[in-house]
Image: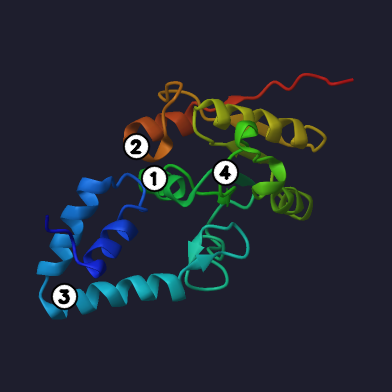
Amino acid sequence: MRDYTPSFRRAIEELNKLPGIGPKSAEKLAYFLLRMNRDDFVEFSASLEELRTKVHRCNTCFGLTEDEVCNICIDPSRDPQILCIIEEERDLIALEKTGAFRGYYHVLQGVIRPMEGIGSDKIRMKELLERIRNGSFQEIIIATNFSYEGELTAMYIAKELAKYQLRITRIASGLPMGSDIEFADQLTLRNALRGREMIAVEDSK
């Protein structure tokens, strides 16, 4: 029985590691790459190498950039009193497309996941608190996803920030439980930003 060549099998195995790509999809992608003309393949490979070597995290908000600080963080036209906390870069892109938000962002690079052993020390919480202490923010918008982990993270952040003189809000309108910000349409996200609500934090004393 004929099998894949070692190089082809390795390509399938590597492609299979990509999120959302199963063995069959990996096989199709491997065939597609094999059929690409050489110039296109070289260009494709170069783009991946450039992605790895040039793109990194912004030193301020931890979004993606090719400079030390991203173009949003150095934009003087943004509102320095408002900070929006999000899970991932994808959420930043989605919110920016709405044109409804003109403050700054803080990318957590994940959420708290107790079942997986991911606590607040594994996301950008320490850096967030440092920005709050050193910044001039008046309102904090918590825009984590409406999943169990996103809600858990939102409540943790709200409790951590309760000691500061800040208006802490949570996007709400138009985003149902279990939804991801990156997949929401722009009108829904605009309504979510405009309809954000204050977060009530229980007194732990």
Query: What residue does disc 2 label?
Result: 183
Residue drawn 52% across the image and 57% down it: 63
The residue closer to the viewer here, 156 or 193, is: 156
Of tags 2 and 1, the one toward the viewer is 2
> Is the N terminus in the top left, top right, bottom left or bottom right quadrant?
bottom left
The residue closer to the viewer here, 82 or 44, is: 44
Of tags 3 and 2, the one toward the viewer is 3
- Left or right: where 24 falls relative to 18: left
Q: Between marks 3 and 1, how big is the CA–CA gap?
A: 29 Å
Q: Secondary structure at mark 2?
A: helix
Inspect the image, locate mark 1, and give the three-letter code of the amino acid beneath it. Ala
Q: Between marks 2 and 1, how big is the CA–CA gap?
A: 8 Å
Query: What residue does disc 4 label?
Result: 84
Mark before the other along the chain sequence, 3 or 2? 3
Q: Residue 94's mark?
A: 1
Q: Secondary structure at mark 4?
A: strand
Of tags 4 and 3, the one toward the viewer is 3
Inspect the image, locate mark 2, and give the three-letter code of the amino acid beneath it. Phe
Mark before the other along the chain sequence, 2 or 4? 4
CB-based contact (under 8 Å), mark 1 and mark 4: no
Query: What residue does disc 3 label?
Result: 40
Residue drawn 9% across the image and 68% down it: 35
Residue drawn 84% across the image and 21% down it: 204
Q: Secondary structure at mark 1?
A: helix
Give residue 100's position: percent from left, percent from top. Answer: 43, 42
Give residue 139's position: percent from left, percent from top. Answer: 65, 39
Residue drawn 20% across the image and 46% down it: 24
Of tags 3 and 1, the one toward the viewer is 3
Inspect the image, locate mark 3, and give the three-letter code of the amino acid beneath it. Asp
